[in-house]
Image (tube, rainbow, N blue to C red):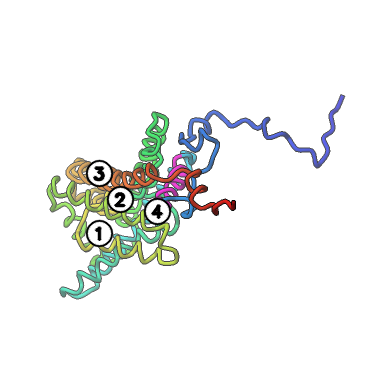
Amino acid sequence: MTTIFSANQEIPMSDKKPSQDEDERKVESDEQHQGKEIEVNEKNLPSKAAAIHELIRVDGEKELERDSFALLWSAIAAGLSMGASLIAKGIFHAKLPDTPASFLLENIGYTFGFIIVIMARQQLFTENTVTPVLPIMQKPSAQNFILLFRLWGLVLLGNLIGTGIAAYSFIHMPVFDEATRAAFVSIAQGVMESSPGEMFAKGIFSGWIIATMVWMMPSAGAAKIWVIFLMTYLVALCDLTHIVVGSVEIFYLVFNGSLPWQQFIYPFALPTLAGNIIGGTFIFALISHAQIRSDMTHQPRNSDKVEKNSPPSQQ
């Protein structure tokens, strides 16, 4: 016997069961348990900062629940795009005259990779020291921590793969002249002049500045590109260390034989990575979340708002 379904007949939603993998990637939150969505309307929240916090938390949950391969490929693309920072800065370094003003112009090139990555919504590790951390601070469950470490691991791996491919191609593809290649080496050697302690301290400030930039983005509107430019330009002017941009530079030295692999890991990668995480997560994100948590704790109950806003009863 054959059962015929009409074109307008729909399969009940209850029959569509989420896969086990989707269940494992589900972020736990108070709103999820209550069957609600996160409130992002500023009028219903105690402050503008709370609205920004909740907008970033919504984005963080989306990132935490993304497919692993999607995260990895996006992170590889970001690593490749970050090569634009070394290209631009290297060309400026090679072509500009040796004057005090050249320092200011040369460091504009540092911003190019960030602008490409962030405007293209690619996965950058230092952005992820804030955005996916807020859902964990709101609900610090074991599953949420597993999702965070999965995201961090995939994005960092993808960023390093991308930066490695970029650096290798800069060496072996006949694109840049000798002056520009020498500039690449000079820029990378300048990074390695810092001690491990200096790289760690510079990484903290770099992580804090990038986290501040992420916090500013929801309210930046059409000025987002200027926010990215100004904040990353500040990182460049202060000669701070960044795990992704710096990886392009240090991989260049590794692949051209100027530096052994071990020195990429230490003194560069481990102190810089630790500094970026501490600056972005344990300083900026924790402090920002603390103020919002205080706001939410002292927020009037809905019933109080109704009583306050309701007109007096007529006798």
Residue type highlighted by circle 4: Ser
Where residue 155 is drawn, which disc sits there?
none
Picture layout, residue 93 above or below residue 147: below
Going from N to C along the chain, the mark reached first, 3 or 2, is 2
Dot 4 falls on a residue whose secondary structure is loop
Tag in front: 2 or 4: 4
Q: Residue at x 26, y 69 (%)?
A: 92
Dividing the picture into quarters, in which one does residue 282 lie? top left
- Name the residue beneath numbered marker 4: 47
Q: Quick check: is 53 in the magenta stretch?
A: yes
Marks 2 and 1, how far apart at CA: 13 Å
Q: Secondary structure at mark 3?
A: helix
Disc 2 crowd, CA 10 A, few/some/many (<14, 14-19, 20+) = many
Residue 235 disc label: 1
Tag 1 or tag 2, which sits nearer the N-term?
Answer: 1
Residue 244 has which mark? 2
Looking at the rendered structure, the kind of residue marked 3 is Ile
Mark 2 or mark 4: which comes first in sequence?
Answer: 4
For label 3, the crowd category at 10 Å Cα-Cα, with few meaning under 14, some 14 to 19 and many 20 or more, is many
Specify start and end residues of the magenta stretch as a single range: 50-64
Split into 4 quadrants, where in the image is the N terminus?
top right
Magenta run includes residue 171: no
Q: CA distance from mark 1 to mark 4?
A: 29 Å
Three-letter amino acid code of the residue under disc 2: Val
Location of mark 3 (residue): 278
Disc nearest the viewer among 1 and 3: 3
Looking at the image, which residue sits at the far right?
Answer: 1
Is residue 308 shown left or right of residue 175? right
Residue at the location (32% across, 57% down)? Answer: 170
